[in-house]
Amino acid sequence: MALIIGFLVGRQTAPTPSAAPDGTDTAAVAPATPTQDTAELARLAQEVAPGTRDEGPTAGPDGRFDATIHGPGAEITSPDDVLKVHRRDPADPFAVGALDAPVVISEFSDFECPFCSRFANTTEPVILQDYVEKGLVRLEWNDLPVNGPMAEDAAKAGRAAAAQGRFREYKHALYTATRDVQGHPNHTVEDFVRYAEEAGVPDLERFRADVTDGTFDESVTAAKNYGASIGVNGTPSFFIGESYVSGAQPTEVFVQVITEELAKVARGDVEVPAVP
């Protein structure tokens, strides 16, 4: 499965955008080709019907959400299965946006990663406002704690918040707090509890227990192994529809790739799968 990323990046024939002023690497961006007219792509993107299934996950009888969810939407056996990376799972507490949105962005991130924080604070708000809220894009989070034990603990804390239906709020609180941190923030359990309180997690004692008692150890390990199995070894990384973007690229790069992926749907090159 590690061939998937090589296939996605290797098939792009266009030159990549220039390096960002901050030195962000753009080598793994999947931009539109020079033969594709930008205005035509934008026109096609505007023709796509938005998704309407935005009801969100439902808590179980115990009032908790399934925060053990990880992995792809279906088994991945070849590079042609790239769209299966996207779960489109109605029970997914780590996702935001319509289940039947024409484009899904599967993000692989780490709460100890400063570049993930950069994406969350600069680009993600634009994607949420311009695409997710309009039913055009669904965002799905995947844990990829590559920055050591503290990153794994942070991933467990994210799942503890998700179990109480507050993952997106927790994620926002954490990344807002680390907006100006240089390097890894080195979070502690007390930091996690503070973010959970800011996020409105209702049962903080249960949250603390879920973070520290091994409840999500297997889920975090499995999520990390899944990322490695498809060749994702750095954060943040993104599958946007069929395309792959590596790093906290400038917002315009994400807009460019999203527009191309929406245009594929408009042309009929990509079919939006039916969802339960």
Image (cartoon, rainbow, N blue to C red):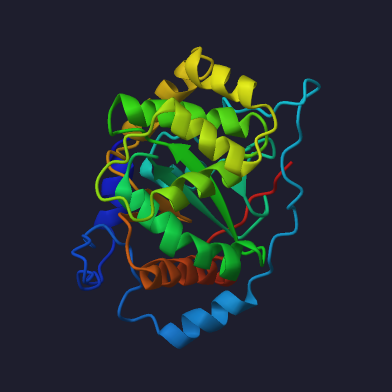
- 252 and 22: which is toward the camera: 22
- 21 and 71: which is toward the camera: 21
Q: Is residue 235 positioned above or below 124 on the image? A: above
Point out the image quarter for the N terminus.
Answer: top left
Who's the residue at 65% across and 64% down the image? 133
Location of residue 69 by image quarter: top right
Q: Residue furthest top?
A: 213
Is residue 189 toward the left or the right of residue 145 in the image?
right
Is residue 260 toward the left or the right of residue 45 in the image?
left
Can residue 128 be seen here? The reply is yes
Q: Position of residue 97 (x, y in %)?
A: 64, 54
Q: Position of residue 173 (x, y in %)?
A: 52, 47
Q: Position of residue 254 (x, y in %)?
A: 41, 66
- 127 and 195: which is toward the camera: 195
Point out the image quarter for the C terminus.
Answer: top right
Who's the residue at 62% across and 50% down the image? 96
Can residue 71 be seen here? The reply is no
- 210 and 259: which is toward the camera: 210
Location of residue 13 by image quarter: bottom left
Q: Is residue 142 positioned above or below 246 on the image? A: above
Q: Is residue 205 positioned above or below 1 on the image? A: above
